[in-house]
Amino acid sequence: MPIPNASADERVLEYYLHDLGFLLKERALEARERKDAQAFEADHTYHIGYLMAMHNVISLMQQQADAFGIRRSLLRLDDINPDQDLL
């Protein structure tokens, strides 16, 4: 849902954040799948570290959204719980 009376620049930022949240969430969930699939591979440690980084990014974006009064749904991060979905 677009911000009412937003300028063109504000709309660009809104769409950017909307897509960014979705893409980061998608990559985080893919990282979890790769980590689980690579449990016995040599690069398993890398996948664990990458997933931990994605957990931190998603958590930070949600915390900042909350602090600034931005609905998580605007960032498409309302349907992920990093502590449950990314650990």
Image (cartoon, rainbow, N blue to C red):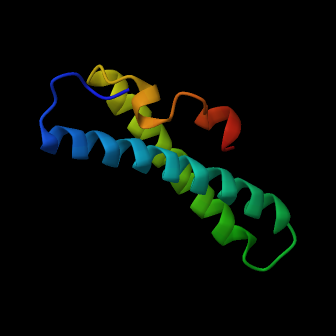
- Please indicate whether residue 8 sits to the left or right of residue 56 in the image: left
Identify the image quadrant of the N terminus: top left
Tell me what residue is drawn at x 66 percent, y 59 percent.
31
In this view, 13 is above or below 52: above
Across and down, in percent, residue 25 comes to: 55, 47
> In terms of depth relative to the viewer, which is nearer, 69 or 8?
8
- Please indicate whether residue 83 sits to the left or right of residue 73 in the image: right
Q: Quadrant of residue 83?
A: top right
- Please indicate whether residue 14 sits to the left or right of residue 9 in the image: right
Tell me what residue is drawn at x 78 percent, y 80 percent.
42
Tell me what residue is drawn at x 29 percent, y 39 percent.
14
Total number of numbered discs in the rendering:
0
Q: Quadrant of residue 74?
A: top left
Q: Quadrant of residue 33?
A: bottom right
Across and down, in percent, residue 23 comes to: 50, 53
Identify the image quadrant of the C terminus: top right
In this view, 47 is above or below 6: below
Tell me what residue is drawn at x 33 percent, y 32 percent.
64
